[in-house]
Amino acid sequence: MLLLLLFAVAFVSQTAARYTANWTSLDARPLPSWYDEAKLGIFIHWGVFSVPGFDSEWFWWHWQGQQPPDQKCVNYMSKNYPPGFSYPEFAPQFHAQFFNPGEWADIFKASGAKYVVLTAKHHEGFTNWESPNSWNWNSVDTGPHRDLVGDLGEAVRNRSLHYGLYNSLYEWFHPLYLTDKKNGFKTQTFVMHKLLPELYNMVVRYRPEVIWSDGDWEAPDTYWNSTQFLAWLYNDSPVKDTVVTNDRWGAGCACKHGGYYNCEDKYTPGQLPKHKWEKCTSVDTFSWGYRRNMKMSELMNLAAIIEDLVRTVALGGNYLLNVGPTPDGMIPPVFEERLRGVGAWLEINGEAIYASNPWRVQTENTTVPIWYTSKGTTVYAIVTAKPSTPTVQLLEPKTSASTKVTLLGNSKPLPWSPVYPKAGLIVLLPELPYTPGQAWTLKLDGIQ
């Protein structure tokens, strides 16, 4: 009888853990805890678009897709390439001859990031692995002649980082997709013969722990068969217990359905959202892919990146910071400098970031901008501008006789005095050390 009862409980538990192919069921899946604890990831846009290295990763569309075409892209091609040159002719020039996945992974590890997301396939349809559904338009058959997805994944995981893959659902010029589009998405030839077989193969082969979906907006999720794919992903795939997904699974899904929410590129909410979210942004403010003509003034500086990271985490989000490698496989030194600078700041202040939670108040701005995070009974006040005086005022914390304040990186308690009885405090700061990003963290114990 006991054995039958145990079997019944096990069966019910197993059944209850399965998800059905509808948003009500899929949206109820708890987000694997590693993702919220990680806080920082690195995004990598790399593909054939890196070869022209002009305009952005949307170069092909701006040149030959949109009507009228972007004249600066037309002029770029007419001045630098022979008449009749086609976009696929860029692929053999995508050499990646200097690509060293170990060196990339070392940079990402040094940045303090806990996960890495590589473009497996962008809207141009070129896959950075030997997709059996992308014959001769992939990184093994042409260009680098190597498995970029697999090589980077091995290096990243060897450094104990989580590995994710970006995948575009649609492809600008794929004939099967264009046929479905012409049919008002009443047919699914592209989905059944290209997209889904490729997605299943990618997941089984590389076991990504993040699937960063994109290119969804032209058609509803029913066209993409998104709920059926996600039900398989959560129930039966090799990464069913650890994988996380975003919210780009069909027109109208953003900020509404999926695992965590992106909502839109560079999304920054004005207040604490009720759902786990991620801000994706790029060091190059004009592009996600590599641009040969980028200027220093067009890049986020380290202080701006740190402030953006802090704000995002204080509001409960993850921060996915993008870099665009060159076609020969190098991460431009100016990007590497930014990433290592973030890591140097996190070496000192990471306690206030990793595995933290939003506090009851996320921000205040009295004498300087303050962002709050918390962990257990400890609250962190992150100061994102250097105070003009040797004191900083915090109005929100409720103090007690046991209140203790320290500066991360210095264990010596700091003197403080109350602003009001049992509320607010003025902290006497030491001489603030130089820190990458010009932000400092006060650790507050014994407050409410």
Image: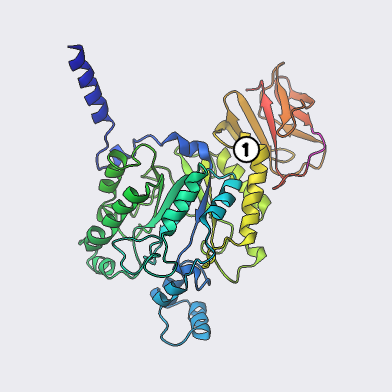
**Residue at far top of view:** 1
**242 drawn magenta:** no
Q: Mark 1 = which residue?
A: 350
Q: Residue at x 44, y 76 (%)?
A: 63
Q: Position of residue 233 (x, y in %)?
A: 31, 44
Left of 61 or right of it: where is 282? Answer: right
User: Residue 271's x, y, as percent?
Assistant: 54, 41
In terms of image quadrants, where is residue 391?
Answer: top right
Magenta stretch? 429-433
Q: As displayed, is residue 170 above or below residue 362?
A: below
Q: Is 69 above or below relative to 209?
A: below
Query: What's the residue type where badge 1 is placed?
Result: Gly
* Picture coordinates of residue 38, whole percent (x, y): 52, 39
How many labels were placed on the picture? 1
| Residue 247 visible in the picture | yes
From the viewer's perspective, is residue 430 above or below residue 203? above
Residue at 53%, 43% in the rendered image: 114
Residue at screen point 57% across, 36% down: 354
> In terms of depth relative to the viewer, which is nearer, 37 or 445?
37
Residue 67 appears in the figure: no
Residue 26, quarter of picture: top left
Quarter of the image where the N terminus is located: top left
Q: Determine whether the residue tagged by mark 1 lies in a helix, strand or loop.
A: helix
Task: Residue 256: give x, y in percent of width and height.
Answer: 38, 45
Crowd around label 1: few <14 · some 14–19 · many ≥20 (10 Å): some
- In this view, the residue in front, 307 or 130, is 130
Viewer-proximal residue among 214 and 33 = 33
Viewport quadrant of the C terminus: top right
| Image quadrant assignment for residue 331 | bottom right
Relative to 334, 273 lies left or right: left
Q: What is the chief secondary structure element of the magenta stretch? A: loop
